[in-house]
Image (cartoon, rainbow, N blue to C red):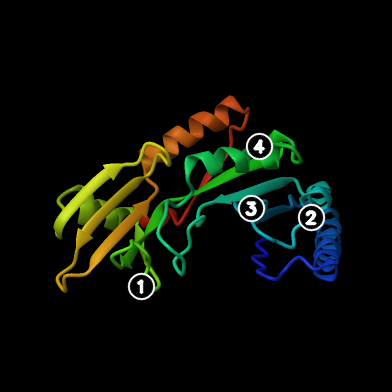
């Protein structure tokens, strides 16, 4: 189940979600089905209407979307910075048994056009890992192109100037950043991971 609800966590919304998931879980169990649910990676960072403590009891598997920490309609930043990733994992582990957790990596990123203060001037363009490799890693096709591995976030970042003279910043997840994050997961006893948008790479 993927309930990507952006509503504020009013008690009525949370209670409705809890009741719905409980009923859905009961129906699934009657059919001998495994019942799983997706959660935002920033569930504990932002005001989300998910009561994980209640919901976990109805779920066989808890999928966590470890991507989109910095969103297309916000200012530039890593897909999911490593320091925040470690906090996210621990927050879920405090409530959900490690055997139930599956951490899902998003193999993509965003390309923001920015102003002189490195602030976004419009909604970012999604960049798949395949496109990122073609445009930036194999051979950068833009002016003043600089590709760096950010040590703090573990992700790749690119700055460049487009044909109109506008400056851009790109951040994306790749195999190397995922390897670092997966190593941390194994240290925590989490051995199940997934990849969103697999067809992208």
Asked if the residue under mark 2 is in contact with the one under mark 3, i.e. CB atoms within 8 Å, the reply is no
Earlier along the polypeptide chain: callout 2 or callout 1?
2
- Quadrant (top left, top right, bottom left, bottom right) of the N terminus: bottom right
Distance from the alpha carbon under mark 2 to that under mark 4: 16 Å
Q: Tell me the residue that label 4 is attached to.
A: 90
Callout in the foreground (3, 4): 3
Residue nearer the viewer, 43 or 118: 118
Instruction: Tell me the residue at 80%/57% (across/down).
Output: 28
Instruction: Tell me the residue at 34%/53% (across/down).
Output: 129
The crowding category of the residue bearing disc 3, from other C-alpha atoms within 10 Å (few below 14, some 14 to 19, many at least 20), is few
Residue nearer the viewer, 125 or 159: 159
Distance from the alpha carbon under mark 3 to that under mark 2: 13 Å
Where is residue 93? Give x, y as percent. Answer: 70, 37
Q: Tell me the residue that label 3 is attached to.
A: 45
Q: Tell me the residue that label 2 is attached to.
A: 51
Asked if the residue under mark 1 is in contact with the one under mark 3, i.e. CB atoms within 8 Å, the reply is no
Earlier along the polypeptide chain: callout 3 or callout 2?
3
Earlier along the polypeptide chain: callout 3 or callout 4?
3
Mark 3, secondary structure of its residue: loop
């Amino acid at each position: 189940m993927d309930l990507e609800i952006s509503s504020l966590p009013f008690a009525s919304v949370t209670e409705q979600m809890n009741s719905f998931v409980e009923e859905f879980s009961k129906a699934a169990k009657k059919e001998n089905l495994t019942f799983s649910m997706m959660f935002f990676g920033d569930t504990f960072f932002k005001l989300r209407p998910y009561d994980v403590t209640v919901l976990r009891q109805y779920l066989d598997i808890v999928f966590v979307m470890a991507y989109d920490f910095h969103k297309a309609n916000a200012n530039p930043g890593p897909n999911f910075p490593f320091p925040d990733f470690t906090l996210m994992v621990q927050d879920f582990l405090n409530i959900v048994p490690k055997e139930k957790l599956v951490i899902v990596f998003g193999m993509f990123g965003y390309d923001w056009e920015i102003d002189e203060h490195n602030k976004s001037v419009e909604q970012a363009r999604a960049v798949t890992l395949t496109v990122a490799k073609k445009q930036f890693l194999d051979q950068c096709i833009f002016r003043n192109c600089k590709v760096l591995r950010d040590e703090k976030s573990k992700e790749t970042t690119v700055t460049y100037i487009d044909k109109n003279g506008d400056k851009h910043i790109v951040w994306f997840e790749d195999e190397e950043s995922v390897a670092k994050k997966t190593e941390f997961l194994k240290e925590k006893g989490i051995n199940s991971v997934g990849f969103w948008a697999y067809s992208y790479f």
